[in-house]
Amino acid sequence: MKLLAIYIMMMVAVSTAAAYQYPPQKMRPYAGIGVLFLPLNNTGDGPLPLYDEPGLSRQGFLSRDQIPSFDWIFGTSPRVLPLFVMARKGDWLRVTYDDAGREAWLNPPRDVTYQAWDLFYKGHVSRLLPGLQKKQYQLYQQQGTAPLMTLTTKQPFKVLQLDNDWAMVLLIEQNSLGWLRWRDEDGRLLIGIVTKSEVRQP
């Protein structure tokens, strides 16, 4: 019995160490059609009304302190919170507003910035997210051809064009062009942005 107890304790210790060394990857969000940035400084605006359909069947309110953080995708910002936009009807946006992926329509305030993915990525230096499948780090000369090379999460690139699930990118350090997937077969995001703290100093 004593040996069994020692064995169990050792297995628990190994499992605990493994869990500490390799934390579980966060679930990547569905990309949708773009991203909406809510400012944090306008606390007087109050919660945002959420609807089942634009202007109909109000289902509740969204407070800024309830929105999940995506700092591992966009970096930490003291000024804005991102919401993933799934659809658009005029001024109305259908957003994912919690970690469970629940969706609702909202009519964003005037101080809110919405950007479709092609415009958003063109304004930033990007990188592939951690924890992806090996095939999702591969760069191609053309879509559907043999891969040219395998990228890492540390290699920065600029997105020049989106074509369905694919992105034409310029590798900054190599100054070369290629194609990679910016969302997977399920529509989940594969690309994040390089924050200022990650920019290499000359």
Image (cartoon, rainbow, N blue to C red):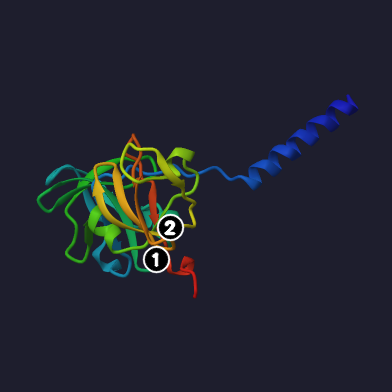
Q: Quadrant of the N terminus?
A: top right
Q: Residue furthest top?
A: 1
Task: Name the one closer to the observer, 190 or 177.
Answer: 177
Question: Which labelled disc corresponds to residue 122?
Answer: none
Q: Position of residue 21 (x, y in %)?
A: 65, 47
Q: Is residue 63 visible?
A: no
Q: Residue at x 70, y 37 (%)?
A: 15
Measure how far apart labels 2 and 1 are at the Cα level: 8 Å
Give the amino acid type for the residue marked by disc 1 in the picture: Ser
- Does residue 99 appear to the left or right of 89 in the view shown? right
Mark toward the start of the polypeptide (2 vs 1): 2
Q: Secondary structure at mark 2?
A: helix
Residue 22 shows up from this direction: yes
Please, is residue 169 above or below residue 136 in the view?
below
| Residue projecting furthest to the left | 90
Q: How many marks can you see? A: 2
Would you say the residues marked 2 and 1 are in contact, meaning their CB atoms lie under 8 Å apart?
yes
Q: Nearer the viewer, residue 38 or 60?
A: 38
Determine crowd level at label 2: few under 14, some 14-19, many 20+ residues with C-alpha closer than 10 A.
some
The reply, left or right, for residue 140 in relation to residue 3 is left
Instruction: Please name the residue that numbered disc 1 is placed on.
Output: 77
Under mark 2, the amino acid is Asp
Q: Which residue in the structure is indicated by mark 2?
A: 71
The residue at 70%/44% (across/down) is 17
Please say if 202 is above or below 105. Answer: below
How crowded pointer 1 is (Cα within 10 Å; few <14, some 14-19, many 20+) is rated as some
Q: Out of 132 and 61, give the one closest to the viewer.
A: 132
Q: Position of residue 26 (x, y in %)?
A: 47, 44
Residue sticking out furthest to the bottom:
202
